[in-house]
Image (cartoon, grey):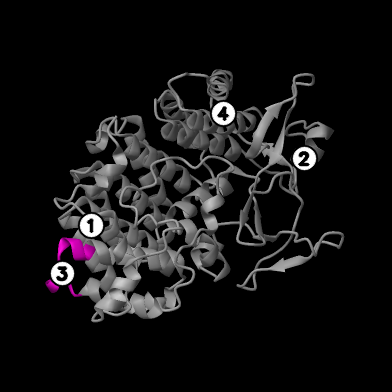
Amino acid sequence: MPDLRRQVLESGKTISRKAASREGSRRTSRTSSAQNSHQSSRNASRHPSDEEDTGNLSDDTALSIGSLDDLTDNPDVDNNNWIQELGSVIQDILDRKRSSVLGREECYAAFCRLLKGHYAEEHIRSRINDLLGAFCRSVKLESSAREATLALRALELLVITTFENTIYEKLEPILTRTIRDSTSNLVKGAAIHCLSACTIFGGAGEDAILDQMTFFLDIAASDGQSIDAADDPSSVTAALQEWGALAVEIEDLEGESEEAIQIFMDQLNSSEPSVQIAAGENIALLYEKSYTPQEDDEDDDSEDESEEESLSDRQGPKLIKRYDAYHNTHELEEQLQSLATIHNKRISKKDKKSLHSNFASVLTTVENPRRGPMYNTAIDQDTNRHYGSKLTVKIGRQGVMNIDRWWKWIRLNSLRRILQGGFAVHYYQGNRAVLDSLPVMVRQDTPADRGTPKKIAKSRNNRRWAVHEQSDEEY
């Protein structure tokens, strides 16, 4: 299979890595060549951002459980002149008459870096329509795959930063056409991600969300053929990932569950781990959604629950089964068990480990939808009971998030893919889209706290409170 990441260089020009990285710091002074030269030589020990690494513009691999170490890797954190630089970048973006393809690529890459690394809502609010117009022109013209892909990334960051509820209506036709008609599979995948972000954060209603879920499901069911991207794993992975992100927004999926799970089961046979994992996570989400909290006026006889399960698995209200997520759960469990223990020599050790951990967790949920994601899930051979470490995610120096439901895990992955190392910045600085999407960040114990009662942590938006709960695994 060709290296999909290299397709980002589909523009007709060859650009060195050093030249591609220069965009991140060249604008603090336009006229001073000495200043530009100094800023172009970035610290070699710093991890490059996705815009600096031209071979890593798209997130075409699924995020494995327990691999969120890069959530706080924000290379722009020490940029004290970012507001001034952002103003200069926006001016360059809007001055299209004197721009070139390479120049626009650099501008868009800098814009993405700045919006990932800083919550800039107040600084771009007045320029939303102008920026939308500039990015959309690049997407429609597709002068180079890199320009179009960066423009789509910029649109994602724009919508998650501004949380503007008119964006979906403006962008949906353009993004749908790009997904169907682009000549680049890389651009198609980026447009799928962008369309999902605009649907979630750009003002789409429930009917529109269901329409896009159907669109993405068709892409997965046809292995990409419905958008002229036959057997392209990046497009299929994107469609599966974003179907899950949209499905989280819908409360009742009983009517969609049977057909969707059958399609996802077909994708479990894919040769691409990213496709398999995305399909597996969607299956777990659908099983989870088939159970809802018991209502106050409901009898306690909907389904028996052992005292052991009640105490060990349930942190909140009792969950009651409402419908069958799929008609043949036994067949599905066998397929998931095979993936959870796969030992194919053709699969790399990294992919094999990822498949084992993810599908052990998915299988646990399918067997008992009251159980959410678990890290290092295993089975006690003597009692045949599942056990494992509850999944927590460490964000920032003291932030910890308890990921005890699949909807939280899928939302976190979606936000992480958009914001990457800037996730913690956007959370702590009060990005409304991020705060409205995820549960409360809780406070992690420090050495000084040990031996003292757990403290209550308060988020910056004055609306979210939580008490830290000790977890088995923190990473």
Between the residue at mark 4 and the residue at mark 2, the CA separation in whole angstroms equals: 39 Å
Between the residue at mark 4 and the residue at mark 3, the CA separation in whole angstroms equals: 49 Å
Query: From which residue to which does the magenta span run?
Result: 95-104
Magenta highlight on residue 310 = no
CB under 8 Å between discs 4 and 2: no
CB under 8 Å between discs 1 and 3: no
Say whether residue 89 is left or right of residue 473: left
Question: Label 3 amino acid?
Answer: Ser
Question: Label 2 amino acid?
Answer: Asp
Q: Which residue is mark 1?
A: 147
176 or 81: nearer the eye? Answer: 81
Q: Which residue is mark 3?
A: 99
Q: Is residue 336 visible?
A: yes
Circle nearer the N terminus (4, 2): 2
Q: Nearer the viewer, mark 2 or mark 1?
A: 1
Q: Position of residue 316 (x, y in %)?
A: 74, 48
Q: Residue at x 74, y 48 (%)?
A: 471
Q: Residue at x 38, y 51 (%)?
A: 196
Circle nearer the N terminus (2, 1): 1
Name the mark on residue 356. 4
- Magenta: main secondary structure equals helix
Between the residue at mark 1 and the residue at mark 3, the CA separation in whole angstroms equals: 12 Å
Between the residue at mark 3 and the residue at mark 2, the CA separation in whole angstroms equals: 68 Å
229 or 419: nearer the eye? Answer: 419
Question: Label 1 amino acid?
Answer: Glu
Circle nearer the N terminus (4, 1): 1
Q: Position of residue 179 (x, y in %)?
A: 26, 46
Q: Quadrant of residue 27?
A: bottom left
